[in-house]
Image (tube, helix red, strand yellow):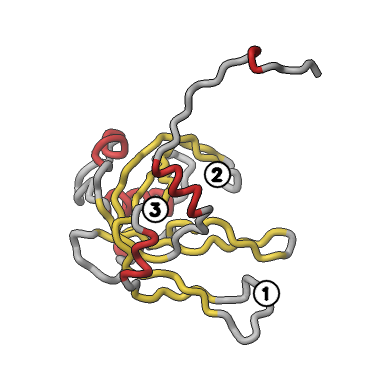
Amino acid sequence: MPEISWDDFDTEAEAVTEEDVKEIEEGPRGGFVGRAICVCIGSTPKQIEFRHAGYSCIGTTLKFEIEKVLEIGVKQFPAPPKSDTDYVMVFEPATPGMSEPWEGETITDDVAFSNEKEKPAMGKRRKMVALKLGLIKPGEQILKSMWRDDIIGKRVIITTEENRYEKDGVTKIGRPQVNFFNGYESVESGNETADKFDDI
């Protein structure tokens, strides 16, 4: 392989923001498990692959910023624990000290758009997200422009959960994810308990 000198290439100038510095100094976060008031700050179209169902579709990745934590997941280990995954996660009301470190952190969630091969649950979830975010009211239609434009700045209560899965007979814990069935609640309703998926 030929040697490369500094004169052989150019690189683009790359800014390092205060936010970058904060994230680097704090180190990687495990991800938020709990219930929080969030605001939508981004919606990016993407191709979503459902390999287990044998189809793909267009959807969007929604990006939310945490404004205030209402409840936070706390690990409860048995005595003695058998492994580092031998615990249950329980939600406890968040004190200001528990909430503040998470304020400004982000949560992402994918929403799949309508597809003729989708299962009924996917359509129900899409409608639930649109309703809870206030994009539509009963009797209205969901439009692409709502996911592209109208959703930005919308506030909602989001519930995330641990992402546990089995691989080669071992329990693994991935990055937390938004609860599929009851992950969204309307902020405007003032409802402090999760709206049920079956109510849609």
Q: Measure the C-alpha gap from mark 1 to mark 3.
A: 29 Å
Q: Which residue is found at the position 64% from the left and 80% from the top? A: 81
Q: Quadrant of residue 70?
A: bottom left
Where is mark 2, residue-wise?
50
Foreground label between 1 and 3: 3
Where disc 3 sits, the SS reads loop
| Residue 105 image offset from top left, x and y in percent | 39, 53
Amino acid carrying label 2: it is: Phe
Q: Secondary structure at mark 2?
A: strand
| N-term mark: 2 or 3 | 2
Q: Nearer the viewer, residue 200 or 187?
A: 187
Question: What residue is at 58 percent from the left and 42 percent from the top?
Answer: 54
Q: Is residue 105 left or right of residue 50?
A: left
- Marked residue nearer the N-terminal end (1 or 3): 1
Number of marks: 3
Residue density around tag 1, few if under 14, some if 14–19, many if 20 or more, within 10 Å: few
Q: Secondary structure at mark 1?
A: loop
Question: Which image quarter holds the C terminus?
Answer: bottom left
Q: Which residue is mark 3?
A: 105
Query: What type is the residue that disc 1 sits on?
Result: Ser
